[in-house]
Amino acid sequence: MIAEFEQRLADVLGSELPAPFTGRVQVEPGSGGGSGPHILLGVERTDVLPSAIGDPPEMVVPGDPQPRRIVRARCTVRLRVVPTEQGGRAQERSGLDAALFALDAPAFRNGHALAGEAADPGFLIRATRILSATLPIEGDDSIRTGLVMEAEGWFWPVGTPGASGPQIQEIRIRGAVMPLSLDIPGPLIAGGEPVALSLSVRSSRLALSGDGETSPPPGIRLALRLVTPGGAPGAGTLQGSTGGVLRVDIANEAVAFTYEPPAEPTREYLVVAYEDGEGGVGQEVARFLLTVEAVP
């Protein structure tokens, strides 16, 4: 993955340089420059970068539509000019000037110039920057000649397979939008006849299939129960309930059910919650006070 980056950088930089360095950039140690000057470059240090909080270890990168494990890294690249015997220091300076100007272009600094056409390049450069360009006075061997730059990006071995797993067939999104409303057609009388109540809710429902199509999914399933102000089971009864819980589906934003008042006057709450998917009571959505009055 580092080798692919080095070669791509050499190829692109060589195409951007003027003569006599056009097309004469090689990866260290190179194969020689023939009769002309040439430039050698190579990665001399690679630092693995820590992931930010929430960054996934796998990303979708060129070469596979499935997420692949990547290495976030910063590469330090050194570039040096190899002059001809006659060119000497003046040719080194000319080559460094040309490389400095080319590598400081916006397309290099944002990594776009290195994107390339390879189906699976092995790297994706996010940013580059030049750190220094050094050409010491002749005779001073304590300073290394050359240009140093950094490149940050994602790296992975070419051909690494992407993550596999079962294909998502459908995602269901549902929600109940406040306010909910409860319609009580008349007074609730202790020991009186059962009363038909109606619960209305504005709902938000959507089903997203694996092929990107959307459609209305089945209705929202709610769990209704009665509790006293202290939290104990209520005295009234919801017809059709099991274990004190009535499970209802709201397909058209409203559902009717029957409440049987207890024999004595009372105050209790109708608690509306999501059904938890296993027949139990999930998150509470709302509660309504039911006041059962004495016989007039």
Image (cartoon, rainbow, N blue to C red):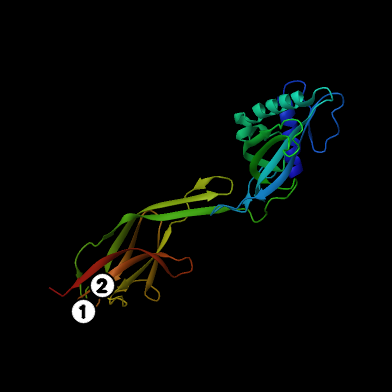
Q: Are marks 2 and 1 in contact (CB under 8 Å)?
A: no
Looking at the rendering, in which quadrant would you find the C terminus?
Answer: bottom left
In the image: residue 122, left or right of residue 249? right
State the residue lying farthest toward the front.
139
Looking at the rendering, in which quadrant would you find the N terminus?
Answer: top right
- Residue 118 visible: no
State the residue lying farthest toward the left.
296
Q: Nearer the viewer, residue 160 or 124?
A: 124
Q: Nearer the viewer, residue 204 or 139?
A: 139
- Classify mark 2: residues with Cα within 10 Å, few (<14), some (14-19) or many (20+): many
Q: Name the residue beneath numbered marker 2.
A: 268
Q: Nearer the viewer, residue 211 or 102?
A: 102
> From mark 2 to mark 1, how far is it between C-alphas?
12 Å
Q: Name the residue beneath numbered marker 1.
A: 264
Q: Secondary structure at mark 1?
A: loop
Q: Quadrant of residue 192?
A: bottom left
In the image: residue 248, left or right of residue 106? left
| Identity, as a three-letter code, of the amino acid under mark 1 | Glu
